[in-house]
Image (tube, rainbow, N blue to C red):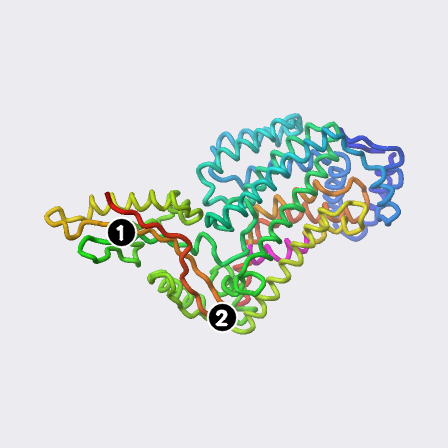
Amino acid sequence: MTALDTAATASSSRERSRVPAWISRAWNSVNTLFETRRIELVTVMTALVVMTHSLFTVDDVRTVLVFAALVIPAVRRFGPFWIGVGIFRFFSQVPNHWPSLDNHQHLINWWCLGLGFALMASQSEEAIRRLARIMLGLCFLFATIWKIRSPDFLNGDFFTWTFATDSRLRAFAETFLGLPEGAQRVNGDAQRLLELGAAGGTEPIITGSRLHIAAIITSWYTVVIEGSIAVFYLVPERFRVARWGHWALLVFIVTVYPIAPVVGFALILMTMSVAGLSGSAHGGNRRWVMIASVLFVVLPLFGRFEDLFAAIG
Amino acid sequence: MTTSPGMTASPGSDSTITPETSDAETSQHNAGRPRLSRRAWALVLIAPLIMTGVAVMHHILTTTSDLNPWKGGGFGMFATVDSPGNRRIVSIATLRNGQTYGNRETGGVLDFNDYSETSLRAATFPNTDRLRSMAREAIFFYELQVDDPTTDQDDVVSMRVEVLTVDFDASANTATLVLVNAVDVAAS
């Protein structure tokens, strides 16, 4: 019996007394997959993301290709396959549909491409891990730079506008931020009136002091959490903070995506985060892999939080 | 010791595995992590370099050519009120009799706010060439559908295409319509 098996058995015995058996079995299965077949776990997660969050592709081709990756291990471990998926996605999306393409679709393309090249490296597992950390770090670095240099982000203008006009956030804004009931409808009318005029025209927007303060706090929180994730993933791994990236990412996903559900983005971030974990079997990584697996299933439900807020309101 | 295919394990790297870790264990684990060869690093860095190249290009185009920060792969989404959804295209004709034609409420002479790929491209990336092309399209539409052939007084002299966006000031609680880019094209 290996040290890993011993540790897993001991851990499993402790957990069995506290949690139902099926949870314990699921915990052990995911951990075993993570410890012994990391590439399998990451490529399966990637295949699921590509299958469920592709736009404008030829559906049949995409489904056949990625389903092949799900059921045939040799396919999903074949670097040129993922390079092909990345290139196929690029040419089926970017040339004709770039104006409506969300950034996470680009990120999925680059991840497929990078995954393919990393699988061709002699130390493929370590190459994938390094790739994931660099790409996560760059993604959040660029997002942070944009928010800092934007003239209307840190002063709260963006989130005040969003809370006051975005119908997806209406229930949240009315329930928790003091936006008067019906304000979004009035603001929508104001926006339409504004668009009827020429440049320079102005219209009043209903907000509220509590909402504005919340918007400023939200803006700074977003910059701090995104900037932190960038630092945690890009800093050399000899520094202690390099181990905090996936926890900071978890805080980001749990606090941001229930309000602004961009599920495809969250799923590709989770996939890359699992890929970027160090190879040790320590408890922090185990907990993270289990949380990531649960979130991978639960995240698509996040869009339903709008209904929950509406029910509370 | 359990290793994954493709992973080169060093002696002692996994021999200290316990359910919880300490700094010493992590340091030991880090020390045992396989070093990537130069070729492996080259393969790893291809996608991040493409990603960085796109982000730099995105930054240049948003600064010089009014590319919308939300689109184009540069991660500027949720950073500004100026989203593609808040941009609006208006085409207004100037006629020989000095009057203008085109109701702003409906997008002007030709409604480009129909969520077609053409309108999305123009709203997202309203460079001058694209707007000139739309102005010529609006002139063609006017001459075909609106122009009265019995008089030259309503002939179109020039067509103006504007891309507008919303600017919001939370301290004053006012939204202002601002010009992103505009072109005037003379009718031939």
- Tag on residue B109? 1
The location of residue B64, given as percent across then percent down, is 48, 48
Nearest to viewer (mark 1 / mark 2): 1
Taking the image as shown, residue A108 lies to the left or right of residue A188, namely right
Residue A311 visible, this orientation: no
> Number of labelled discs?
2
Taking the image as shown, residue B82 lies to the left or right of residue A33, namely left
Element at badge 1?
loop
Our reading of the magenta stretch's main secondary structure is helix
The location of residue B91, given as percent across then percent down, is 31, 52
The residue type indicated by label 2 comes to Thr
The residue type indicated by label 1 comes to Val
Taking the image as shown, residue A166 lies to the left or right of residue A83, namely left
- Tag on residue A207? 2
The picture quadrant where one finds residue B17 is top right
The location of residue A312, given as percent across then percent down, is 55, 66
Span highlighted in magenta in the image: A250-260
Taking the image as shown, residue A289 lies to the left or right of residue B31, namely left
Q: What is the crowding at mark 2: few (fewer than 14 residues within 10 Å), some, or many (at least 20)?
A: many
Q: Residue at x 33, y 51 (%)?
A: B161
Give the Cα distance between marks 1 and 2.
35 Å
Which chain does tag 1 point to? B
